[in-house]
Image (cartoon, grey):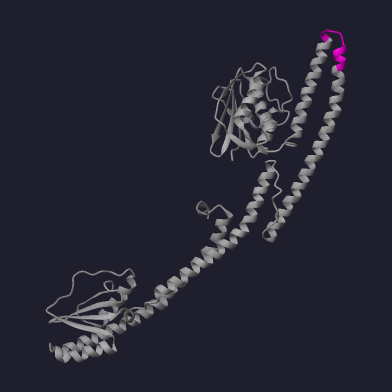
Amino acid sequence: MGPLKRFLPKGLFARSMLIFVLPVMMMQALIAWAFFEEHWETVTSRLSEGVAGDVAMMTLLFEQVGEDETAFAPYARNARETMRLDVDFRPGDTLPTSRRTSFFRTLDRTLRRALTAQIDKPVWFDTTRYPNYVDIRVQTETGVLRYIAYRERVFATTGHIFILWLLGATAILTLISVIFIRNQVKPIRRLADAAEQFGRGQDADWFKPAGAREVRQAAHAFLEMRRRIQRHIDQRTGLLAGVSHDLRTPLTRLKLHLALMPEGPDREEARRDVSEMEQMLEEYLTFARGEAGEETQVTDLSALVAEAVADAGRTGARIDLKAAGAVEAAVRPGMVKRAVANLVANAAAHGDRVAVSLRRAGSRIEILVDDDGPGIPPERYEEAFKPFSRLDDSRNQNRSGVGLGLAIARDVARSHGGDVTLSQSPMGGLRASLSIPGG
């Protein structure tokens, strides 16, 4: 079964069609085989044997009367009227040397077997020249007896009607299966679309449970899960708003006290501590806030990346931006800009030069951030995405922050149905690739 899986359809609709249609087709094929092998071929054999017997009898009568065509004429007339068999004697003629084979070889095989069993003379026949007749010729000592028999006397001509009925029934059953299976698959597809949209942070208010009982049950479970997650997000957002307000108030008072203090080394150290505390607070809140509060909209990512690079360039970082045409996608622009800014800031903190580029890769959009810094060992790529991870000293020299930049960037990318991956940069340092759907 293993090698066969590669050839099986992957979609639910195609697999359901295979489950319904394949047994019907196999059953129809078995019925057709049984019909042709047991019934149709048997009837055809009986008919061919009957015509072969008439031909043998007329040949024997002709040999008994000799070449007296006048004496043979009554027999030929009776054969035409009673046996529907036309007889014509061709003196001095010989049998043709070429023969055309019927598309249904069973017809020729059955007639040949019947003729050779009852006639001990050379026989030739053609079942293809005339649509409604069969041409049979028997070699005699003085010439050729040519017989023209009606086709329905030689073969069972209703076999094609049976085949048409089988094909028609299969087509009707397939059409009915397509209609019903499509109606069953559509709610599952809608549920998948709603789950994907919700996973990207988009509203899926259009979704309503439909379909079979099991599908409706899964849809209701999804809606309940969505309500619980949304309630959790709302509660977390409210909590973060309160925490932000409560923590910013004492920080503001500390800044005021520092501003009133006389100049001196202690004041500068305290100011740096307060600034670092405020930056850490912002990073904590940004990481915890996640995707709450921003709506999805079609955005020009080229302009968005340029803005993020320009903001990072104000800090003195050397950043090269590979310009690209307008690349639009449905994203939450504030979050994507924050993710790109984090990746650029991370690269600028660890390297002297940074290169940022935007490109399409099939149905996805990739934002590449390269640096010429010390890089990260490949076995520690995933560890770099853990919140508060700082890795080794080679990537932490003169580094501020709490180790949430990559974690926030990956969280943003995955909320859009994408991801952030790390690899070795062509510049010798680290490459961070932010990939999101481009549809």
Number of marks in the image? 0
Q: Can residue 213 be seen in this view?
A: yes
Q: Is residue 376 visible?
A: no
Between residue 379 and residue 372, name the one nearer to us: 372
Q: Judge from the rendering whether residue 15 lies leftward or rightward of residue 71; answer left or right.
A: right
Q: Which residue is drawn at 56% across and 61% down?
A: 178
Quadrant of res 364? top right
Quadrant of res 422? top right
Q: Judge from the rendering whether residue 267 lies leftward or rightward of residue 73; answer left or right.
A: right
Does the magenta-highlighted stretch encompass residue 291? no
Between residue 193 and residue 11, name the one nearer to us: 193
- Image height check: is 345 above or below 417? above
Residue bounds of the magenta highlight: 256-265
> What x and y, as percent, mark residue 153?
32, 82
Q: Quadrant of the C terminus?
A: top right
- Image height check: is 135 above or below 171? below
Does the magenta-highlighted stretch encompass residue 257? yes
Q: Residue at x 69, y 29 (%)?
A: 338
> What x and y, as percent, mark residue 344?
64, 24
> What x and y, as percent, mark residue 363?
55, 39
- Image height check: is 166 above or below 373? below
Q: Judge from the rendering whether residue 82 lies leftward or rightward of residue 364; answer left or right.
A: left
Between residue 89 and residue 423, name the one nearer to us: 89
Q: Which residue is drawn at 85% across and 13% down?
A: 259
Between residue 203 and residue 395, name the one nearer to us: 203
* Magenta segment, prevailing SS (helix, strand or loop): helix
